[in-house]
Image (cartoon, rainbow, N blue to C red):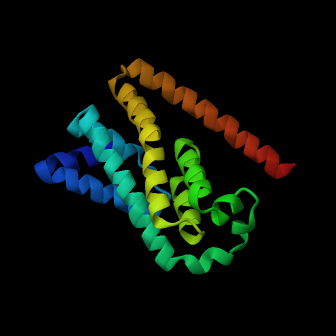
Amino acid sequence: MEERMIEFLQAYGGAAYFLSLACNVAISVLGVVPSAFLTAANLTVFGFWPGFWVSFAGEALGAVVSFVLYRKGLRRWSQTTWLSHPKVKPLLHASGKEAFGLIFALRLLPFVPSGVVTFVAAIGRTSFPVFAAASSLGKLPALWMEAYAVHQFLEAAWEGKLMLAVASIVLLWFVWRKIGQKAAG
């Protein structure tokens, strides 16, 4: 996927910046597609710092557009049962400084799906300015860590990539096994 995105961005020259932003917005609106492949493409096509800033702008813009769309179109889902989960309620009912702090903190955590945070904030009490500021500021360090990790991976020799792939497969196997044990027990 990353290779195709690199070819796509390289084919459009100066318009590649805007196309990358549009792709990031689409990924954010979908809410379930990881954006690491686009970050990797941006770093490859534009270089580290320009690629980082294009990725940041795209993710921030994507979060804001998603928030507005979710708020307008998905509020009726606010009565679904999973929103009564104790881990979701704090963000759903937060506003002002509390919402800012929660969104900022959740954006720093790489294992918390960005789309879920945006969705819950959008159907909850969080105001647009609080969401936009907290989400964007929280994405800065998180995206920097992602960009640095992706950059290091892209620069690694094939041996390093192989070791990382094997480690990832082993980790996935352990997680899959743990999930299977919980489901059975």
Viewer-nearest residue: 95 or 30: 95
Quarter of image, res 82: bottom right
Viewer-nearest residue: 99 or 146: 99
Q: Is residue 132 left or right of residue 122?
A: left
- Would you place residue 119 above or below residue 159 in this image? below
Quarter of image, res 51: top left
Q: Residue furthest left?
A: 13
Counting from the top left corner in percent of width and height, residue 44 is at 26, 36
Q: Residue at x 62, y 37 (%)?
A: 172
Q: Residue at x 38, y 25 (%)?
A: 152
Q: Residue furthest right?
A: 185
- Would you place residue 147 above or below residue 90 in this image? above
Q: Residue furthest bottom?
A: 76
Viewer-nearest residue: 160 or 135: 135
Q: Count all numbered tags in the image, as a single digit.
A: 0
Counting from the top left corner in percent of width and height, residue 17 is at 21, 50
Q: Residue at x 36, y 62 (%)?
A: 26
Q: Residue furthest front?
A: 97
Q: Is residue 4 left or right of residue 177?
A: left
Is residue 23 visible in the rendered structure shown here? yes
Counting from the top left corner in percent of width and height, residue 151 is at 35, 29
Counting from the top left corner in percent of width and height, residue 41 is at 29, 42
- Would you place residue 48 above or below residue 53 in this image? above
Is residue 1 visible in the rendered structure shown here? no
